[in-house]
Image (cartoon, rainbow, N blue to C red):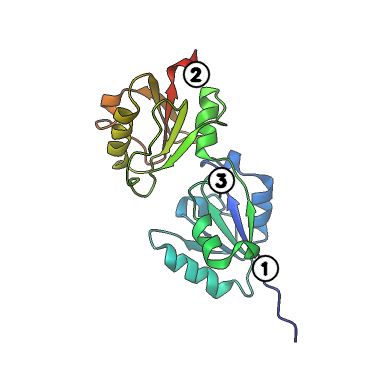
Amino acid sequence: MAAVKQHPIIIAGCGPGSPDFLAPTVRRAVEGAEVLVGARRLLDLFPESAAEKIAVGADVEQALRAIDERRSDKKIVVLVTGDPGLCSLARPVVDRFGRDACLVIPGVSSVQAAFARLGLDWTDARIIDAHREDPAAVPEGLRGVAKIAVLAGRQEAFRWVAGLAEAVGEGYRIYACEDLTLPGERVREVGKEDLGVLRFSPRCVVLFIREDVLR
């Protein structure tokens, strides 16, 4: 007897937060979903969905088990913040179930939105993930890099960002891009001394832009 073909696990990028940045393909995937998995704020983007909703918190393993228990006969959509390919829940899902079992729908990342707010391209940007924990060390070779984006994600990360500011030296302007696309969005230039003192939103991208790029 032939094996029953399982539905692919759809991993849907939900953009930086605003419903306006949800792609039509994501909305169609959610309409056909029987199970939605994601952070509570992403699940709340779809109040009209009748799908079973599984909120993902700190225990990612629990969410993976829930997906595994349902994937044989349910249409599952995993909602991720921003773009699935950039610091998202997509990685542990793909690692667990394999690329062939997953269908990825790209989305707008907060990094894209941050550079767009400054009117800059990001082809040559270096991206650093400090969202869940501090990187082990300041990456080598960042001094002189034209554009650096740090996904902060928690107040404690800004001490590490302050250390990065010291490591890269002078000649940069620093921008804190908070709550992008949301009603409380704020993009402000900050000084090195502000990074360890000011309070920032947990949804924050910090951009280091070399001054000559802005001329």
Q: Nearer the viewer, residue 148 or 18?
A: 148
Marks 2 and 1, the one that precedes in the sequence:
1
Q: In front: mark 2 or mark 1?
A: 2
Residue appearing at x 52%, y 29% in the figure: 115
Q: CA distance from mark 2 to mark 1?
A: 47 Å
Please name the residue that numbered disc 1 is placed on.
7
In the picture as drawn, the residue positioned furthest to the right comes out as 1
Residue 199 in view in this figure? no
Q: Nearer the viewer, residue 85 or 82?
A: 85
Residue 191 in view in this figure? yes
Please name the residue that numbered disc 3 is placed on.
83
Residue appearing at x 33%, y 24% in the figure: 169
Residue 133: image x %, image y %? 34, 49
Marks 2 and 3, the one that precedes in the sequence:
3
Q: Given contact means CB atoms under 8 Å apart, are the residues at marks 2 and 1 in contact? A: no
Q: Given contact means CB atoms under 8 Å apart, are the residues at marks 3 and 1 in contact? A: no
Amino acid bearing label 3: Asp
Please name the residue that numbered disc 2 is placed on.
213
In the figure, 19 relative to 166: above or below?
below
Q: In front: mark 2 or mark 3?
A: 2
Residue 75: image x %, image y %? 64, 66
Amino acid bearing label 1: His
Residue appearing at x 28%, y 42% in the figure: 156
In the figure, 111 relative to 6: above or below?
above
In the figure, 79 relative to 59: above or below?
above
Which element is circle 3 on?
Answer: loop
Residue appearing at x 33%, y 33% in the figure: 164
